[in-house]
Amino acid sequence: MALYSQQLQQHLQAVEDSLPTYLPQGEGIAAIMHYACEGGGKRIRPVLVLEYCRLCGGDPSVALPFAAAIECVHSYSLVHDDLPCMDNSPLRRGKPSAHAAFGETMALLAGDALLNRAFEIMLGADTVHPSAALRAAFELADKAGVNGMIGGQVLDLDSEGKCIDEPTLKRLQEGKTAALLQAACRMGAILGGGTEEQITCAGQYGYYIGLAFQVVDDILDVTATAEELGKPVGSDDVNEKNTYVSLLGLEQAKALAASYTTQAIEALSAFADHEDLRALAEALLTRTH
Amino acid sequence: MALYSQQLQQHLQAVEDSLPTYLPQGEGIAAIMHYACEGGGKRIRPVLVLEYCRLCGGDPSVALPFAAAIECVHSYSLVHDDLPCMDNSPLRRGKPSAHAAFGETMALLAGDALLNRAFEIMLGADTVHPSAALRAAFELADKAGVNGMIGGQVLDLDSEGKCIDEPTLKRLQEGKTAALLQAACRMGAILGGGTEEQITCAGQYGYYIGLAFQVVDDILDVTATAEELGKPVGSDDVNEKNTYVSLLGLEQAKALAASYTTQAIEALSAFADHEDLRALAEALLTRTH
């Protein structure tokens, strides 16, 4: 099943076309920022920003700066995660990671610059009312910080080499994966002029597909072939990582992923034209890589 | 000569009292964020935010979140600058640097968290009109990024071990030192409801005291005793750094610092009650450490 409907594919194209224009141009650190953002990811966060803007009656193009911003934040987190003092990953999406390609010092600075750039883009945008811009930008700051993504990262480091329980693993993944997806959907709804109920429901969809995504990742790590996955199968196991499969077993993990997906889909009832996002949630559940 | 008048001392106290309340509470990364912000610096950036708010007719207390935010950005830059892949400094203001005290991984994340926190604080502030908040926060993002502080950092790395000319050194210091001071003054003027002319003049004061500050630093590095300076005298020379003294000679460097200070003071004419900032500019010029 294709991940994106025609509508979401249009958003993806808009993101691919506009993202480079929101980054600084030139050699040096600017080039590293482009490199880090050009990894060929799914762009799921910016696509969700645009789609929720549209679902709430807004013109998706007004949300483009905010879509670019959340991709900058995601990209910075990958650059810093790959650094030698973090995961020490030489590869990212089959290419040399930023520090492998450009050295540790410049990768550190390019990561800083991408996080900073996200706010330059959003706060300099004149596409929406200042109060909507302020609120949408706050969503991203809030979910990217110690109460969200960075908090999840810290929990992950704390739990290395330890056995943790499922509530702790959930809290970790709420931060590492769900927070930014939640922010994406809420930002889109805010920018599109959604009601408070719609903004809340948007956040719930992002939150639950985020949790489901991570459970599916853990499942694929033990069930997929290396070829499908593009990384060594069972790599989590080798590193003694806590995963949903190691904590719950394969069958219960599958049931949990399905349950999270159901909850994501339930949160779509606040939106009339939500077929594409229902299909996206299902495609993320049944993906094989 | 004391750096701060009674008025500026009051701002300093307000910053010291409120800054910890804008940081997350608790153990782990929160504690490192506090540690990084509690280094006993001069707090010149947040003090300038408050004073320019006051000079433009605003209540300085509405600018407190923005004052805290710029100190977070300054602190993050020091944490990341000290990392092994950057300056590899074990000490900061006479205490172990963040990575020396808490390890490289947590220092990296705490730096990220401080930069991110700056925006959480500003965008979550409800002390000023959204359009003023947005503009003030943009000032900080703009001057902290590739066009400002990070850009200066990159130029600094590029020029290591090379002989650069004075215009390049100036450009480097415009980014590394002047940009954030410029942002501080402009933010305060924006938050205080200053006119466009006042905002421009505020930025000029910050810009010129920033440039003067760095020239004086270079001068002190060759003229001060180690005791006054708290670091080995001539340390720039040992590292073959480009300094204003190495490029211009001591006398011309002194003349340049005086000239920048004069230009800073000239930019005060847009403000009626500017005696404290004139005294500050002079105290920064004649400081001995």
Image (tube, coloured by chain):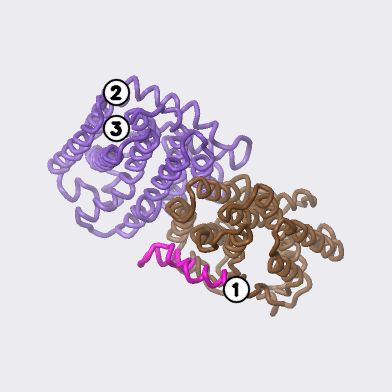
Chain colours: A brown, B purple
Instruction: Report the front residue among A107 and B13.
Output: B13
Q: Chain of mark 3?
A: B
Badge 2 element: loop
* Image coordinates for residue B58, horizontal then vertical, percent: 38, 29
Mark 1 vs mark 3: in front: 1
Q: Are marks 1 and 2 in contact (CB under 8 Å)?
A: no
Q: Are marks 2 and 3 in contact (CB under 8 Å)?
A: no
Rounded to the nearest angstrom, the CA distance separating label 2 from label 3 is 12 Å
Which three-letter amino acid code belongs to the residue tagged 2?
Ala
Mainly helix, strand or loop, the magenta region?
Answer: helix
Which three-letter amino acid code belongs to the residue tagged 1?
Gln
Badge 1 element: helix
Residue, disc 2 = B2
Q: Which mark is residue A9?
A: 1
What span is in magenta? Answer: A9-36
* Image coordinates for residue A234, horizontal then vertical, percent: 74, 69
Q: Which mark is residue B289?
A: 3
Locate the C terminus of chain B by quadrant.
Answer: top left
Q: Chain of mark 1?
A: A
* Image coordinates for residue B64, horizontal then vertical, percent: 46, 32
Other-residue count near label 2 (Cα within 10 Å), few / some / many at <14 / 14–19 / ≥20: few
Give the mark, 2 or 3, whose residue is nearer the N terminus: 2
Mark 1 vs mark 2: in front: 1
Rounded to the nearest angstrom, the CA distance separating label 1 from label 2 is 62 Å
State which quadrant residue B90 falls in. top left
Other-residue count near label 3 (Cα within 10 Å), few / some / many at <14 / 14–19 / ≥20: some
Residue at the far right in the pictured view: A251
